[in-house]
Amino acid sequence: MRKLIVAGNWKMNTSVAEGVELAKKVSEYTVSKNLPAQKQVVIAPPFTHLAPIAQVINADKVILAAQDCAATTNGAYTGEVSASMLKGLGVKAVILGHSERRQYFKENSEILLKKIKLALAEGLDIIFCIGETKEQREAGANLYNNVIKAQLVDTVFTLTPEEFKKVIIAYEPVWAIGTGLTATPEQAQDIHAMIRKAIADNFGQAVADDTTILYGGSCKPSNAAEIFAKKDVDGGLIGGASLKADDFAKLIDAR
Ligand code: 13P
């Protein structure tokens, strides 16, 4: 059965002290909910916060994720953090391909595939983000569907089915990230169904049925339940609303 996930991507926000407090609250809330194993909570704080947060969360209940990892294993790469370093901190998953990494740091499919392989080699799960820009959305369904498919074909679709089982897809329309604009539940469902069909065409229906596909982009307590209720939406990757413990708790409840 595929997992239902509410994941918080904190991006470059909070001090270490604030982050530790937030993580404690998320952990306490999640523990108090006694969620079934199918339902998971993930938090992805900044690199600097991972070690202290690993000490304060219940790692059986909250999955600690990083927001990125290096495309190389080790060596003279000033400023980079490798997948194995993350693993050593108790990190279980890594977000890769976020549109902010693609846009501001020029990460393309070639770089992303290197990161994916290195993260998988460390046994990390991958939360792989895909999605179209505003211009691509406005150019029509043919174009944006092809853009989204190409983001998969060039990367995670080259993995073996066994490797792909470690991949969670996050559909994040770029026009909806941090803008207050949310995809309607129907728009999200259409794309999620298209993604699941593409996975089925590539890996078979059983793999597609088991793949978790998250929605991300201005998800908040007031709109999440409606979006998460859609058949092919298995939860959310939450930015802004994951920074407030109360809002994130409501999002956990919405899934
Ligand atoms: P917002 O929820 O702030 O729109 O961010 C979504 C996102 O980019 C999560 O990765």
Image: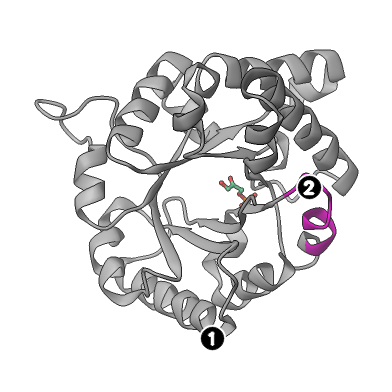
| Residue 89 in picture, x, y percent from top left | 22, 56
Question: Is 114 situated above or below 205?
Answer: above
Q: Residues within 10 Å of mark 2 (few under 14, many from 20)?
A: many
Quadrant location, the C terminus: bottom right
What whole-number distance in Å separates the C-alpha atoms at marks 2 and 1? 30 Å
Task: Kindly identify the amino acid type of the residue bearing the numbered disc 1.
Answer: Ser
Residue located beneath label 1 in the image = 32
The mark lying in front, picked from 2 and 1, is 1
Q: On the rendered structure, is 164 left or right of 190? A: left
Furthest residue in direction left, as rendered? 75
Give the colour scheme shown: one colour
Identify the element where label 2 is drawn: loop
Q: Magenta segment, which residues?
A: 225-233
For residue 71, say whether it is visible: yes
Q: Residues within 10 Å of mark 1 (few under 14, many from 20)?
A: few
The residue that appears at 16% across and 27% down in the rendered structure is 77
The residue that appears at 35% across and 34% down in the rendered structure is 120
Question: Is 66 situated above or below 41?
Answer: above
| Residue 159 part of the magenta segment | no
| Residue 231 part of the magenta segment | yes
Residue located beneath label 2 in the image = 182
